[in-house]
Image: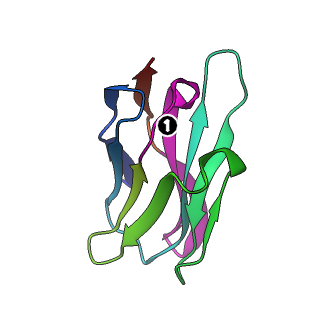
Amino acid sequence: QVQLVESGGGLVQAGGSLRLSCAVSGSVSSIDTMGWYRQAPGKQRELVAKITSGGSTNYADSVKGRFTISRDDAKNTVYLQMNSLKPEDTAVYYCNGILNYNQVFRNFWGQGTQVTVSS
């Protein structure tokens, strides 16, 4: 069975940094686009950043210049480096991946990891 396993969330003061990791657990043939989304209380889930298999990246305007997404295909892992964190970055962060599983590209989600930024 394939899962996305996230780690790295926690509590940090404003201006601090955190690094999120998301590892693909299980056997897949290939990994297409992977990304990070977040959902704050009372708000809809929104895209934070995504990275294609070719390495192209896309960021939400609110995190440009502060967050960096990267991937290590040898480890089937995607990372989100978050710097200069703000209280408004507080949310549950979800990893998303489009994975080739049983010869079909399917959309997978992680369980979510809480990021809390105190002022």
Q: Position of residue 75 (x, y in %)?
A: 26, 70
- Of the residues shown, which amino acid type is indicated by label 1? Tyr
Q: Residue 88 in magenta?
A: yes
Residues packed near mark 1 inside 10 Å, few (<14), some (14 to 19) or many (20 plus): many
Q: Position of residue 90 (x, y in %)?
A: 51, 26
Q: Where is mark 1, residue-wise?
A: 93
Name the residue at the bottom extreme. 54
Query: From the viewer's perspective, is residue 68 above or below residue 8?
Result: below
Q: Residue 95 in magenta?
A: yes
Q: Residue at 44% x, 41% y: name it.
A: 84
Q: Position of residue 26 (x, y in %)?
A: 31, 60
Query: From the viewer's perspective, is residue 1 above or below residue 105?
Result: above
Q: Position of residue 36 (x, y in %)?
A: 53, 50
Q: Which residues are magenta?
A: 83-109
Q: Residue at 73% x, 29% y: name it.
A: 44
Query: From the viewer's perspective, is residue 71 above or below residue 36?
Result: below
Location of residue 7 (image quadrant): top left
Query: What secondary structure do most residues of the magenta stretch adopt?
Result: strand
